Amino acid sequence: MISELQTEFHGLPVVDFPIDTAPTMPAQGPVAWRISVPTYEPPFDWPEAFAKFRAAVDPAGVQAIVVGGWSDPYEESSAPVVEALAAAAGELPALRSLFLGDMTSEDCEISWIVQSDVTALLTAFPRLEHLGVRGGSQLSLTPVRHENLRSLVIETGGLPADVVRAVAASDLPSLTELELWLGTEDYGADSSVEDLAPILSGEKLPRLTRLALSNSDQQDAIAAAVATAPILPQLRALDLSKGVLLDGGGEALLAGQPLTHLESLDLHHNYLSDAVLERIRMTLEPAGVELDLDSADADEDAYDGTIYRSVAVGE
């Protein structure tokens, strides 16, 4: 989840680059370098910290970078960070994994993180295999073809429709994992289930085996669309967690294509009744599907006769 900073990124331990002292390289094995500056009153901005990093650590051997905070991310966008990374692409031939915006709420609430156009992270690094982005405010992406990207994760409290459409229009023949936290309209989500249709068709995602369309207040409609989607039979892991999933969505999953081929189904943080939860268990557990049906903190609030339900990650 996003309450703690990452300690591991794609199988590599995360090591903080000490921006104010000379770093000591780990004695064994590669690491994911976390490069960050304080989000409030930093001694210098992120591009300068990145320059210090490249001067202290041989960039040619760097396999993974985790971008933490930058100066005033609730006001200033990630554009200078993206520009600095793209400009240094020639110095980073081994870079395969990149995460942009590893911040907790103490640094900056997820929906306050001001992102930017991240297309250059894909075009500048054609060998990149893993890209993660946290924060949806001002986030943009141009549809691309990328031959080597294997996983794309975008974590938001509200993902703009233009970004959803750009992901859907991108040609990603090697992608095996796609994770989109779609969020709510309160925090900038304005996509529709129809925007997901090219993803659910699977036409440009021939190798996708894990799909997460989560954290949405439209989770019922998404579940219904996934249940009949052409891409479903090729999936091994399906994640529809963290959203407002009601019995209608759960019943749509049960009534759609068989899910018994899945290795895992994640529906945690849900508003499903005990009866529907039991039907899901009885249908899928005998087939060996690993289930996460924990309702977690999905609590209903009633006010003036109206029931309010929320996604797991908003602000």
Image (cartoon, rainbow, N blue to C red):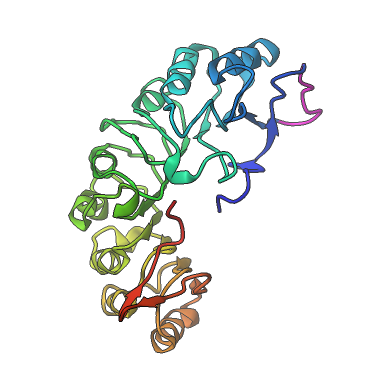
The answer to whether residue 173 is above or below residue 37 is below
Q: Nearer the viewer, residue 171 or 311?
A: 311
Q: Residue at x 44, y 18 (%)?
A: 86
Q: Residue at x 32, y 78 (%)?
A: 304
* Residue 152 visible, this angle: no
Q: Is residue 95 left or right of residue 284?
A: right
Q: Nearer the viewer, residue 215 or 286?
A: 215
* Residue 247 visible, this angle: yes
Is 131 in the magenta?
no
In the displayed orientation, state which residue is furthest to the front.
Answer: 304
Q: What segment is highlighted magenta in the picture?
A: 22-29
Give residue 44's position: percent from left, percent from top.
Answer: 60, 16
In the displayed orientation, state which residue is furthest to the right.
Answer: 27
Give residue 251's position: percent from left, percent from top.
Answer: 30, 80
Most common secondary structure along the magenta stretch: loop
Residue 114: quarter of image: top left
Q: Residue at x 21, y 49 (%)?
A: 198
Is 27 in the magenta?
yes
Give residue 204's position: percent from left, percent from top.
Answer: 26, 43
Q: Residue at x 41, y 62 (%)?
A: 311
